[in-house]
């Protein structure tokens, strides 16, 4: 059931968040990255040695995002890094328009796409790309913005709801009876902007005191089922504990992909 995220503003709201990234158990390197309110990983990194944490009042712009470099393409770690760098540059540039957040986020995605595509051309890559899943907080609202299959979940009154929209061919696979493979991406950062116009999924809601959120790469969702994700996020006393448990469970279940998670609480 779709949860109602349209409620009144809570005054004096605090955002508490944690971020962690791990290369998992099967991949030789970490192709994930993130943007954690101004912080991101270097281009070549095995992840975070410890969780990054954040606590702040929601009185300005806050962007939290996860980027997953395409494992089936070239230079996935470069793609996610360039996307994270462009997110930083965009947030620092002052281009966000307070009364027009959705067009601003669309513009940011297009700039990230162009940067990843141009970098791929410079490297001679046949295909280089990254997903993005993000939350943008401003005033009494938050915006979900994603391209690809990295996800954003919201938790309210103990229930989980996927707030992002997967850009994959899963529906087509079901219609044609195709099995035995993971759904392919239909959109990602790094597509030739002259051939395809990106259509990021963007939706805005009002937040409520007690809301909890998870942004993650598919290294989490492919390894940990939604029931356990819900239990971990709802029962953890801090975002840091939730992130640590999600990474641990993903690795306990095989750790087949890179694992990146951002958990945040609104209080």
Image (tube, rainbow, N blue to C red):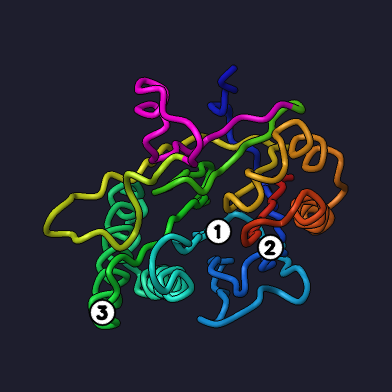
Q: Residue at x 18, y 59 (%)?
A: 193
Q: Residues within 10 Å of mark 3 (few under 14, many from 20)?
A: few
Question: In what quadrant of the picture does the N terminus appear?
Answer: top right
Q: Is residue 212 above or below residue 243?
A: above
Of labels 3 and 2, earlier in sequence is 2
Of labels 1 and 2, earlier in sequence is 2
Q: Residue at x 56, y 57 (%)?
A: 59
Q: Which residue is mark 3?
A: 124
Position of 154 with respect to 96 (left or right) is right
Residue 195 visible in the picture: yes
The residue sitting at the front extreme is: 180
Q: Which residue is mark 1?
A: 64
**How far separated are the C-alphas under marks 1 and 3?**
30 Å
**How far separated are the C-alphas under marks 3 and 2?**
32 Å
* Front of the two marks 3 and 2: 3
Q: In the image, is residue 160 part of the stretch drawn in magenta?
A: yes
**Residue 228 at what x, y percent from top left?**
79, 36
Q: Residue at x 59, y 71 (%)?
A: 30
Magenta region:
159-182
Of labels 1 and 3, earlier in sequence is 1
Position of 229 with respect to 179 (left or right) is right
The residue sitting at the top extreme is: 1
């Amino acid at each position: 059931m779709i949860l109602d995220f349209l409620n009144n503003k809570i005054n004096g709201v605090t955002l508490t968040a944690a971020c962690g990234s791990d290369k998992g158990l099967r991949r030789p390197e970490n192709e994930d990255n993130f943007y954690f309110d101004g912080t991101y990983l270097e281009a070549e990194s095995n992840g975070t040695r410890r969780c990054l944490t954040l606590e702040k009042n929601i009185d300005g712009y806050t962007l939290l995002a996860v980027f997953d470099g395409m494992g089936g393409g070239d230079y996935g770690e470069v793609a996610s890094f360039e996307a994270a760098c462009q997110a930083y540059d965009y947030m620092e540039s002052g281009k966000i328009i307070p009364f027009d957040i959705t067009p601003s986020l669309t513009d940011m995605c297009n700039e990230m796409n162009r940067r990843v595509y141009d970098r791929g051309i410079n490297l001679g890559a046949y295909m280089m790309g990254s997903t993005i899943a993000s939350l943008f907080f401003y005033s009494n609202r938050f915006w979900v913005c994603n391209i690809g299959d990295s996800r954003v979940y919201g938790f309210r009154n103990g229930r989980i709801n996927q707030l992002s929209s997967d850009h994959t061919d899963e529906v087509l696979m079901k219609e044609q009876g195709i099995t035995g493979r993971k759904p392919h991406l239909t959109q990602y950062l790094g597509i030739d902007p002259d051939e395809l116009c990106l259509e990021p999924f963007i939706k805005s809601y009002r937040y409520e005191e007690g809301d909890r959120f998870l942004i993650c790469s598919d290294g989490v969702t492919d390894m940990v089922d939604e029931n356990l994700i819900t239990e971990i996020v709802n029962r953890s006393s801090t975002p840091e504990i939730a992130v640590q448990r999600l990474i641990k469970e993903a690795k306990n279940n095989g750790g087949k992909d890179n694992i990146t998670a951002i958990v945040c609480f609104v209080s």
